[in-house]
């Protein structure tokens, strides 16, 4: 009998992490029976289905359809539905990804049912407990039986927190598997033509962290600083639903701002990969984009005071500015003068992370 392996995904950043692992597990179809569960945390076409289509992810075996809610309610709804499911049809292993609410919800349910939990992208820490993701990371790591780590800081963090070393495996960054698999495919994207952008002659921006986008004063100030410091380069901003809500409700996009910033709907994986890989530089508060720009050698300015992925700063192309306008402007000026070195690609960010994970599982299952 094949081992039943449940992969739980819920939000946009999970999909590109699960895709290569699902494919790799499917190569051993005598040994594993992978089951894909979508919690429904993200549900808009542009935040979910589009990624399934573009990354060739099979239709989920189950969709829990939980949707948006307060964190407690959203996490609880996922837990109730998953517990029911796992009690009726018990998997041998549950695999969770990253740091979203769906990750911790699935980890908690499985561990209480004494089902083994594997966490992909374990050990990352921003040391900022005001971020919901940090709470999700710490809890998920401490519930997990197997911790697949993406960079050296993860190994140090888990050791310091007393997690037994025999549970921890350094496998590299699984998002880079997906990036490498799609980098040629994204050449076909016509997003630059569609938005009338010239390669290397624009700045790509994404912002969606509650601390940056929920307060209209902060968001207004940040967008003002970005557009004036980047001028005359056009700024293109694929906008997360959460950010769009603040922009709309508080009428942030004045005539002046909308002349210099191109606000577009969230893009699919291939369009966004093309957009970042052809940009002059990227400004973001996303975790995944810090990693992708490091791999691509594109300068990245991160509007946060901390990062859970310090290797993107020490080896990659990432700079942290926080929200101080002077810091943001200085970083932009520095990048526009091309004062930054290109950076290097961290160890094991090589497209073979999912292979290393499955090789490891083959050895223990
Ligand atoms: C979640 C993750 C975050 C990740 C981000 C990527 C947590 C705690 N946070 O944040 O780590 O970087 O996804 O996008 O899990 N909404 C829609 N359509 C959707 C999904 C959300 O309109 O398909 C809107 C809703 O108004 C919702 C808000 O976005 O209330 C926030 O969505 P939610 O999934 O709670 O968190 P994100 O901010 O997307």
Image (cartoon, rainbow, N blue to C red):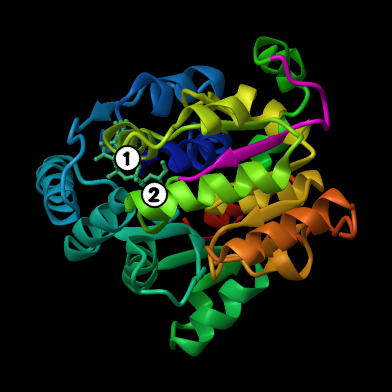
Residue occupying the point 46% across, 83% down: 164
**Residue displayed at 20% across by 34% down:** 67
Task: Locate residue 122, reporting x and y percent.
Answer: 49, 64
Relative side of 35 to 221, left or right: left
Nearest the viewer among 34 and 363 is 34
Query: Which range of residues does the magenta coloring cover?
Result: 196-207
Q: Is residue 1 magenta?
A: no
Given residues 241 and 113, the one toward you in this image is 241
Determine whether, in the image, residue 359 is placed left or right of residue 145: right
Name the element at disc 2: helix
Looking at the picture, tell me which residue is in the foreground, 183 or 254: 254
Q: Point out residue 69 in the picture as x, y percentages from the top left corner.
A: 16, 43
> Which residue is most to the front?
256
Label 2 – label 1 distance at C-alpha? 7 Å
Q: Dot 1: few (<14), some (14–19), or many (≥20) neighbours within 10 Å?
A: some
Q: Residues within 10 Å of mark 2 (few under 14, many from 20)?
A: many
Q: What number is the disc on residue 213?
A: 2
* Residue carrying label 1: 246
Q: Position of residue 242 (x, y in %)?
A: 33, 39
Q: Earlier in the sequence, mark 2 or mark 1?
A: 2
Query: Quick one: quadrant of the N terminus?
Result: top left
The answer as to whether callout 2 falls within 8 Å of ligand 1 is no
Under tag 1, what secondary structure? helix
What residue is shown at x 21% (from left), y 46% (from top)? 90
46 versus 296 height, above or below: above
- Which label number is shown at residue 27? none
Which residue is depicted at the point 37% across and 33% down? 244
């Amino acid at each position: 009998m094949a081992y039943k392996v449940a992969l739980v995904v819920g939000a946009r950043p999970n999909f590109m992490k699960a895709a290569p692992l699902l494919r790799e597990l499917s190569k051993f179809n005598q040994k594993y029976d992978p089951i894909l569960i979508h919690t429904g945390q993200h549900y808009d076409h542009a935040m979910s289905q589009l990624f399934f289509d573009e990354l060739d992810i099979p239709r989920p075996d189950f969709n829990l359809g939980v949707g948006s809610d307060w964190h407690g309610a959203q996490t609880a709804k996922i837990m109730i539905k998953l517990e029911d499911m796992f009690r009726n049809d018990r998997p041998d292993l549950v695999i969770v990804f990253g740091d979203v609410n769906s990750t911790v919800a699935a980890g908690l349910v499985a561990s209480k049912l004494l089902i083994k939990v594997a966490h992909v992208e374990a050990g990352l820490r921003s040391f900022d407990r005001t971020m919901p993701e940090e709470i999700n990371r710490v809890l998920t790591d401490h519930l997990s039986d197997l911790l697949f780590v993406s960079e050296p800081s993860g190994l140090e963090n888990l050791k310091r927190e007393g997690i037994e070393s025999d549970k921890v495996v350094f496998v590299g960054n699984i998002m880079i598997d997906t990036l490498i698999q799609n980098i040629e495919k994204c050449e076909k994207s016509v997003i630059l033509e569609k938005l009338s952008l010239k390669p290397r002659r624009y700045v790509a921006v994404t912002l969606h962290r509650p601390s940056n986008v929920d307060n209209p004063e902060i968001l207004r100030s940040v967008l003002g600083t970005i557009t004036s410091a980047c001028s005359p380069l056009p700024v293109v901003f694929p906008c997360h639903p959460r950010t769009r809500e603040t922009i709309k409700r508080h009428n942030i996009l004045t005539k002046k701002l909308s002349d210099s910033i191109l606000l577009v709907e969230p893009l699919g994986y291939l369009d966004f990969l093309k957009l970042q890989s052809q940009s002059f530089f990227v400004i973001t508060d996303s975790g995944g984009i810090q990693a992708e720009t490091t791999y691509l050698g594109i300068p990245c300015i991160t509007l946060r005071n901390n990062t859970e992925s310090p290797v993107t700063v020490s080896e990659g192309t990432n700079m942290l500015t926080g929200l101080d306008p002077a810091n943001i402007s200085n970083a932009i000026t520095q990048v526009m003068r091309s004062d930054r070195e290109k950076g290097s690609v961290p160890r094991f960010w090589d497209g073979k992370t999912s292979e290393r994970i499955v090789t490891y599982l083959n050895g223990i299952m």
